[in-house]
Amino acid sequence: MAAPGSAALPVLILLFILLLLLPPPLRAAEPSEEPADTRGAAQARAYSAPAPVTDVARLCVCDLLVAQCDVNCCCDADCSPQEFGLFTACSVPLVRGDSHLCRQKAAVYSLDVEANPPERTFQLIDQVNPSIFCIHATNYKQALYLRSPEMPTPENFDDLLNEFGSSAFSAEPENVDTDPPDANETQRYEYGLPIQTQDAFLRLPSPVVSSWCSDANPAGFLVNQATKCIRSVSVERCESIQALNMQFYINSSILAVPKSTQKVNISVQSIAVQSLEGMRTLLKGADGLRLPLILDDLCLNVVLGVSYHITYTDTGEIIEAAAAFVLGAITKETLSVQQSFQISFTQVDTKPAPLSGSPGYVVGLPVRAGFGPRGSGITQSTSRHSQLSILQSTPSQDCLAAQAARAPVLFGHNMISGCKLRITAAMKCQPLAQTLLDVLKGQSFPEYVASFGNSQAQDVLDWVPITHLHISEQSSCQIPVSFGIEVKWTKYGSLVNPQARIVNVTATLTTTTLQQLPSGRERTIPITSSVVFTDISSPAEPGYKAWPTINIKLPYDFFYPFV
């Protein structure tokens, strides 16, 4: 027999389901829209701006004097109402925080000039940024304060050097591209790319954090570099220090092109031995390895300098690599040595830019010029079209036929040349002006001139920029008729052996008005090009004698047995 409540349970469930299916009861009519103030308050609560980090009402950027009133500084708390009455304007009328925030407080200062005396007015307003890229909340806490850098200690120095010691570093880990290179992609070295070797890249040690050597500096393709750094050494460990061994710099072959299997071995070009006094001796026929050797209290064959020379093709392929070494000795008292490293590049079937003196210019040698600075220094070219040159006179004296004839500018040689231009009525002004400019300046006029005859490309401060002047008339059509180069030089160094040094180069272009000729008429005008060298050395002081006179009397047999 069933319990009394068990029969009523299905009835209760059925009633509950019917109540859920009934429609909701009717309510009284309500406004379709919320009041504006209620809706605005709700939006304000939903989009409330973060608490300001800076109280703009207390911020005053023009308050420079302590406990004194700054003139026209309307936010200066040290100013009294009487002093505000003397102001002419507010130097800082608006003070606000971060302008990138979507909503922020701003302090507005102004002067009420209608009052007597004038009064300062202050108003604190809510400023809205209309930009859609504004910042709603500054929730990145690390950006609100300056993080103190980690100071190097003996415990973390190696970790910091590995993280920041390379030529370039990033806070994010680099993504290693494991995809194979495209078969259609041309593999070649480009300017600045690290020269790859079997294990990593060609190392050119250089100072990083201090003057101590770091072997993590890669040699860049076509980037001429010259570095000097200090290496810690000791006689007891000289045979085990890799950086003092010749083999460390030539044991890894260079890849002919990036990511290739073709290898180029580094050969030994020359070996020079430096004595403890600094005198160097070039060893003849020495092309083998000379390993460090401990002998008594000395360590011999220590690498003091390495000079790499790379030969490449015009397609960016390295075909030859050589290294010239300077070896020396260290004593038991030596704790560190200075090493020098250098790398240079030469394109195959071309000659490197020759020197014109050491260090000063030699009269009759070409003035060295180049372009830049780009990358690590001045770019030089052995092409005659990229050197400092002037127009070369030809037997025909025809300017339009003498465009390719150029004469190099030789130091100390004043030169003048020219040609004749036959103008007809059919000639157009602009094409003719450009043609004459190419005739006078050449295809590619250099930008810099070497101050010394042996100035290195990486020493940008040893190169003098060429100053250009333009002398013209007021006319719509101007054609160049003259191009003059003035080279100012001075005697540098000792009076006994002065060295010629270029200090200024000025190129002056003179143009004239091209008169329109009647049909069938012709006119011939001269075109000139010149170069002048001016010595601006300061004269010796009055009364100065280069060779002092010694007033002594020598014995009569002082030169015996010579007469």
Image (tube, helix red, strand yellow):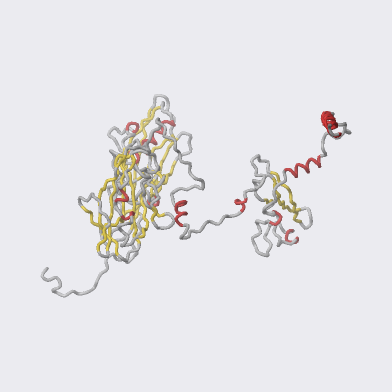
Q: Is residue 450 above or below residue 260?
A: below
- Report x, y in % for residue 323: 29, 48
Q: Provide residue 168's location: percent of width, then percent of height.
A: 45, 48
Residue name at image x 65 percent, y 43 percent = 134
User: Which one is nearer the viewer's eye here, 92 or 559?
Assistant: 92
Q: Where residue 254 sits: x, y (%)?
A: 33, 43
- Tell me: residue 261, above or below residue 284: above
Q: From this viewpoint, is residue 484 visible?
A: no
**Residue at coordinates 72% horizontally, 51% vertically from top-left?**
108
User: Could you tell me which residue is drawn at 77 percent across and 58 percent down?
Assistant: 117
Q: Is residue 311 left or right of residue 161?
A: left
Residue found at x 70% / y 46%: 103
Pick the front one: 217 or 158: 158
Looking at the figure, which quarter contains the C terminus? bottom left
**How many numbered marks have been drawn onto this rendered protein structure?**
0
Looking at the image, which residue sits at the far left? 561
Q: Quadrant of the image for the N terminus?
A: top right
- Which residue sits furthest top? 520
User: Where is residue 279 shown, x and y percent of the image?
Assistant: 25, 60
In this view, 212 is above or below 405: below
Q: Is residue 307 visible?
A: yes
Q: Residue furthest front?
A: 1
